[in-house]
C-alpha cells in the first residue's frame, strides 16, 4: 500500500472544494470577463485546472482514452505575456469563442473522477513517495491557481461578483514599528536536495550553498503609510528614483500610484477583493507594489531590495549558524505564525504574528504578501527540467522575471517551504506582493 495516496485524496478533494467556492464568487455573466489583459478570460481557468490534471495523470495511470482530447489541448496552457512589449504568445488551440460553462464543468467532473480512480491504482503500488509526484504536482498547481484566480477577481468589477458569506473582519490598528537588523556575513542554502524533499518544482533544485556578505534589513515590510509618503512627497514622479526601463514603463502606462490604490479627488482609497476602504485605515498594512515601484522607493530611501540569498539567510538562518525549515523554527505552518492560507482574505497590520519572526527578529517573511527580491529568476547550477513539464520554469528564464519568496494571505499552506520560488515580471502590478529594504 502507498501511504501517500489516502492523504493526497483528502487534500485534492479539499483543494477542489476550495476552488469551486472561489468560482462561485463569479456571477454567470462574469466568466467571460478578462479582468487582466495579460490573462485569459476567467472561463479558461475552469477548464485549465482539470486539463492540467488529466495531462499529468491520465496517460500515466489510466488506460482509457481522454474524456475530451480537444479540451485537453485547448486548456493546457495560459497566456505567456511580455508586459513590456505587449506581445502575448497564445497557445495555438485557443478558440475565438470559449465552450459553454456547463460543458467545461462536465469535463472537469469527469477528470476529477479519473484522478481519484488513478489514486486507487496508486494505493496498490509500492511505498514510494515519488510515485505520487504527478498527483502532488496537480495539487500544488491547483493551489497556485487559486491565488492567481483571487488576484484576478480583485480586478473584476464588483457587479460581476458575489460576496461569499462568513468572511473575516478586516484587521486595522497599529503595526509593528520597523527597525534595522544586522545580519552578519555567512553562508546560506538555496534550493533543496531531491532525496530530502518529497516533491519540488524543477527550479527548486539542486541544493547549493552560497556566501552572503553582511547587510542590514528592515524588521517589517514597507507599509501603505510609508509608500504614501513617497507618493505625497512628489518623489514618485521624479525620474531619478527609477531605473531607465522602469521609468519608461511608468510613463507609458501612466501609473501614479500602486495598483491597489484609488484616488478620487482628494480622497485616497484601498481596494480589497470586495471593498474600497479609506487608505488611512490600512496605513499599517504592507503596501502591494510592482518590483519597479519597490525599486524606486528603495532608491528614494537610499537603500535597495534584498537578493534571494539575503532573503533566505535572514529568513531561514540563525545566529548559531543553523538553518530552519521555517523562519519560526521547525513547526508546521499554522495561523499563529503568519497571515496565509486565507486566514483573513486581506493583509493585516505588519508584525501581527510575532511568533512567526525569524531567529534574527525579522517579522513576516512568510505571509501577508509575497516579497520581491532583486534576483532575476534563473536556474540553479545543475538545473534539470521537469520530465513531464519541461517548460514549467525554463520558459521564464528570460531575465525579465524576478524571484519572490514567502507567501501571501492567499497562499495555501502546502506551498510554504524554504525552497519554493515564485516569479513575476518587474512591471506586473497585480500580485499580492510586498517588499522591504536592505542596506550594505
Image (cartoon, grey):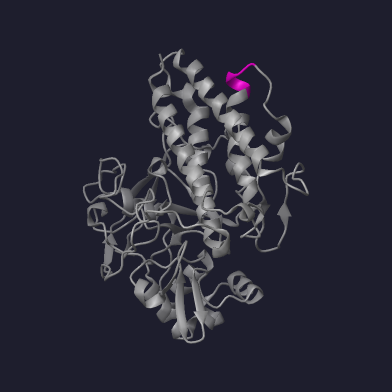
Q: Does residue 212 appear in this view?
A: no
Residue 353 painted magenta:
no
Percent position of residue 37, x then y: 66, 60
Position in image of residue 51 (x %, y %): 63, 35
Q: How many marks?
A: 0
Q: Is residue 278 above or below residue 342?
A: below
Helix, strand or loop for the magenta stretch, by majority: helix
User: Which residue is pictured at 72% across the width and 58% down the height?
Assistant: 87
Classify residue 374 as left or right of residue 333: right
Q: Is residue 74 above or below residue 271?
A: above
Side of 191 where 379 appears, left or right: right
Whether 61 is among the magenta residues is: yes
Looking at the rendering, in which quadrant would you find the N terminus? Answer: top left
Name the residue located 74 percent from the left edge and 34 percent from the top edge: 70
Is residue 204 something that shows in the picture? yes
Quarter-of-image position of residue 245: bottom right
Q: Give how far across and how far down residue 196 sits, in percent.
A: 38, 30
In this rendered view, identify the residue nearer to me: 30 or 314: 30
**Which quadrant of the view contains residue 123?**
top left
* 70 lies above or below 260: above
Question: Which quadrant would residue 390 be assigned to in this image?
Answer: top right
Q: Residue at left 42%, top 75%?
A: 227
Q: Quadrant of the C terminus?
A: bottom left
Q: Seen in the image, is 148 located left or right of residue 331?
A: right
Q: Which residues are magenta?
A: 59-63
**x and y percent of residue 270 in the render?**
45, 71
Amino acid at each position: 500500500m502507498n501511504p501517500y495516496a489516502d492523504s493526497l485524496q483528502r487534500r485534492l478533494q479539499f483543494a477542489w472544494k476550495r476552488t469551486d467556492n472561489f468560482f462561485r464568487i463569479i456571477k454567470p455573466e462574469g466568466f467571460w470577463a478578462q479582468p487582466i489583459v495579460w490573462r485569459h478570460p476567467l472561463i479558461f481557468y475552469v477548464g485549465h485546472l482539470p486539463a492540467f490534471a488529466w495531462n499529468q495523470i491520465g496517460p500515466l495511470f489510466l488506460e482509457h482514452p481522454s474524456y475530451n482530447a480537444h479540451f485537453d489541448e485547448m486548456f493546457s496552457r495560459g497566456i505567456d505575456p511580455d508586459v513590456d512589449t505587449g506581445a502575448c504568445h497564445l497557445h495555438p488551440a485557443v478558440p475565438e469563442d470559449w465552450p459553454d460553462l456547463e460543458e467545461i464543468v462536465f469535463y472537469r467532473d469527469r477528470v476529477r473522477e479519473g484522478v481519484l480512480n488513478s489514486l486507487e491504482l496508486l494505493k496498490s503500488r509500492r511505498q514510494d513517495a515519488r510515485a505520487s509526484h504527478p498527483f502532488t504536482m496537480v495539487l500544488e498547481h491547483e493551489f497556485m491557481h487559486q491565488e492567481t484566480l483571487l488576484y484576478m477577481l480583485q480586478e473584476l468589477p464588483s457587479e460581476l461578483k458575489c460576496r461569499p458569506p462568513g468572511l473575516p473582519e478586516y484587521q486595522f490598528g497599529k503595526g509593528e514599528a520597523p527597525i534595522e537588523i544586522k545580519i552578519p556575513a555567512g553562508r546560506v542554502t538555496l534550493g533543496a536536495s531531491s532525496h530530502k524533499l518529497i516533491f519540488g518544482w524543477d527550479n527548486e533544485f539542486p541544493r547549493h550553498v552560497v556566501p552572503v556578505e553582511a547587510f542590514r534589513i528592515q524588521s517589517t515590510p514597507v507599509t501603505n503609510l510609508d509608500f504614501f509618503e513617497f507618493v505625497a512627497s512628489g518623489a514618485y514622479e521624479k525620474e531619478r528614483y527609477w531605473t531607465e526601463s522602469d521609468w519608461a514603463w511608468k510613463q507609458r502606462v501612466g501609473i501614479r500610484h500602486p495598483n491597489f490604490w484609488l484616488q478620487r479627488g482628494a480622497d485616497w482609497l484601498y481596494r480589497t477583493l470586495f471593498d474600497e476602504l479609506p487608505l488611512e485605515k490600512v496605513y499599517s498594512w504592507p503596501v502591494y507594489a510592482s518590483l519597479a515601484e519597490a525599486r524606486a522607493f528603495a532608491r528614494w530611501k537610499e537603500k535597495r531590495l534584498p537578493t534571494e540569498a539575503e532573503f533566505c539567510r535572514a529568513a531561514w538562518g540563525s545566529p548559531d549558524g543553523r538553518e530552519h525549515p521555517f523562519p519560526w523554527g521547525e513547526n508546521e505552518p499554522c495561523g499563529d505564525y503568519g497571515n496565509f492560507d486565507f486566514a483573513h482574505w486581506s493583509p493585516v497590520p505588519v508584525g501581527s504574528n510575532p511568533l512567526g519572526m525569524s531567529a534574527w527578529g525579522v517579522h513576516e517573511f512568510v505571509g501577508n504578501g509575497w516579497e520581491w527580491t532583486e534576483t532575476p529568476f534563473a536556474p540553479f547550477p545543475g538545473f534539470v527540467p521537469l520530465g513531464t513539464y519541461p517548460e514549467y520554469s525554463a520558459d521564464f528564464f528570460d531575465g525579465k522575471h524576478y524571484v519572490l519568496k514567502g507567501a501571501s494571505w492567499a497562499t495555501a499552506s502546502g506551498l510554504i517551504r524554504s525552497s519554493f520560488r515564485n516569479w513575476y515580471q518587474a512591471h506586473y502590478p497585480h500580485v499580492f506582493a510586498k517588499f522591504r529594504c536592505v542596506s550594505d
